[in-house]
Amino acid sequence: MQREEILSVLSHRYPFLFVDKIKEICYMESVIGYKNVTGNEPWVIGHFPEKAIFPGVLLIETAAQICGFIFYDQQKKNVLSNSYLSNVKNFKFLKLIRPGDQLEVRGQFITKAFNFADIKCEVYVDQQKVAEGSLRYYFENIPNEQEVNQ
């Protein structure tokens, strides 16, 4: 999935859009997506400009935006505007991320209960894990059990 389709699905826009490409979506199962960390992003000016490090909060936001595509049904072309990040659990930063790195974010559906769904997230740079944790999303309308089990 390229930029135009990503923009049609997510309501985020520059400077708060952190998805460059979605490689694979298995609806309600898994997702793989990418964010290219560049030296001309607004955070670089103030987050250790001599040795810029991608901020952890932006890494979590990147993971949340990409992992949210698990809930995107490519056949129905639904928009993800009815979901919100509601909880971040056990997120660990294992290595520094710098401009020039390409983040590969992998999300795996864990469970859902009521209007909440949990995703296990792992982030890689050059096939080395740089972060991991769990994300919980709140939905105004969550897909029903039949859709999950298809």
Image: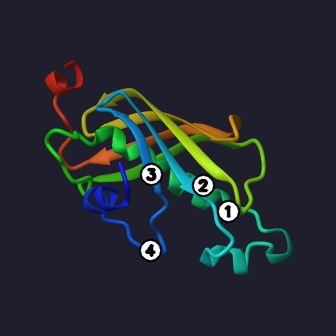
The amino acid pointed to by label 4 is Tyr
Closer to the camera, 4 or 13? Answer: 4
Q: Say what secondary structure mark 4 lies in.
A: loop
Whole-percent x, y for residue 30 in the image: 40, 30
Distance from the alpha carbon under mark 1 to that under mark 2: 6 Å
Q: Mark 3 points at which residue?
A: 21
Q: Mark 1 points at which residue?
A: 55
Res. 40 image quadrant: bottom right
Distance from the alpha carbon under mark 1 to that under mark 4: 17 Å
Classify 120 as above or below 138.
above
Q: Say what secondary structure mark 1 lies in.
A: loop
The disc placed on residue 14 is 4
Instruction: Nearest to the eye among marks 3 and 4: give it.
Output: 3
Res. 119 image quadrant: top left
The amino acid pointed to by label 3 is Lys
Q: Quadrant of the C terminus?
A: top left
Whole-percent x, y for residue 89 in the image: 56, 40
Cβ atoms under marks 1 and 2 closer than 8 Å: yes
Dot 2 surroundings within 10 Å: few (below 14), some, or many (20 or more)?
some
Sequence-wise, the earlier of marks 1 and 3 is 3
Q: Name the residue under label 2.
A: 59
Distance from the alpha carbon under mark 4 to that under mark 2: 16 Å
